[in-house]
Amino acid sequence: MEEIRKNVATLEGRGWKIRFSWVKAHTGIHGNELADKVAKEAAQSTATHYEYTRIPKCYLCHRVEEEAKQKWQAEWTASNKAAATKQYFPSVQQRLGIKLTLTAKLAAVLTGHVKTRANLYRFNIRDDARCICGHNDQTMDHLLFQCEKTSTQREILKHQINQERNRMEIKQELISKHKKVFCEFIDSIDFEIFLQNEQ
């Protein structure tokens, strides 16, 4: 830019009148075509002593963001922690693409820290892990996919996801494709009831 200013000042000093205006590119305007030709020759020339050393800020921000996501994904994949969360979000990019309003229940479910009998049994807070339905250990997967006590909510979820299919989709799809109804399903479960003794 400084070089252009100097050249303009030199030409004006010799009596030139210089005016800049926009012209449509590649339409056969002689001066514009000539400028394109000279610019291409200069860009391809090895004899030039000029280098463009400035990089647009938006480009740098984009590069830094992409590199951060790649590093985050590598660490996320390599980590042996957060197994429950990885079932819902195997990809960092996928999680960043989903807007979630986290409630206490939803956060507990997505992290695997929900108060189920199986979790409490794991930490020696309960003497048994069996669900009040009497069929299996009371894990979140059991409540989500099998427990007869959540069958009404599960049928509503299945119906809203797809009326033609009678199967639950994998967790990743529940949160990415059916977030609203999945969150309603989680919100409808009264986890405290499941911790009570069998009637």
Image (tube, rainbow, N blue to C red):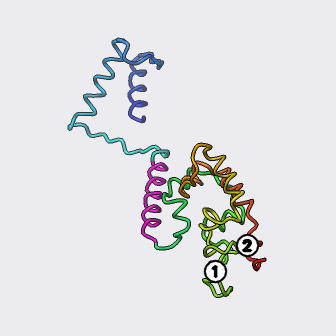
State the SS at label 1.
Answer: loop
* Residue that numbered label 1 is attached to: 129
* Residue drawn at x 64%, y 78% as measured from the top left: 130
Which quarter of the rendered picture does the C terminus lie within?
Answer: bottom right
* Residue drawn at x 44%, y 65% as measured from the top left: 77
Amino acid residing under circle 2: Phe
State the SS at label 2.
Answer: helix
Q: Which of the two residues, 144 or 18, is positioned nearer the viewer here? A: 144
* Residue drawn at x 67%, y 53% as measured from the top left: 155
Using the numbered discs, state the Cα–Cα distance from disc 2 to disc 1 in whole angstroms.
11 Å
Residue 26: numbered disc? none
Amino acid residing under circle 1: Ala
Residue 96 percent coordinates (x, y): 56, 54
Badge 1: few (under 14), some or many (20 or more) residues near its Cα, within 10 Å?
some
Place residue 172 in its image quadrant.
bottom right
Horizontal side of 49 relative to 25 (left or right) equals: left
Which quarter of the rendered picture does the N terminus lie within?
Answer: top left
Badge 2: few (under 14), some or many (20 or more) residues near its Cα, within 10 Å?
some
Residue 49 percent coordinates (x, y): 26, 40
Give the dominant element type of the magenta stretch: helix, strand or loop: helix
Q: Give yes or no for contact between labels 2 and 1 (Cβ–Cβ under 8 Å).
A: no
Q: Which of the two residues, 108 or 57, is positioned nearer the viewer here? A: 108
Question: Relative to residue 148, is residue 118 depicted above or below?
Answer: below
* Residue that numbered label 2 is attached to: 194
Task: Please state the extent of the stretch shown in magenta in the rendering.
Answer: 60-79
Q: Which of the two residues, 127 or 179, is positioned nearer the viewer here? A: 127
Residue 47 percent coordinates (x, y): 21, 37
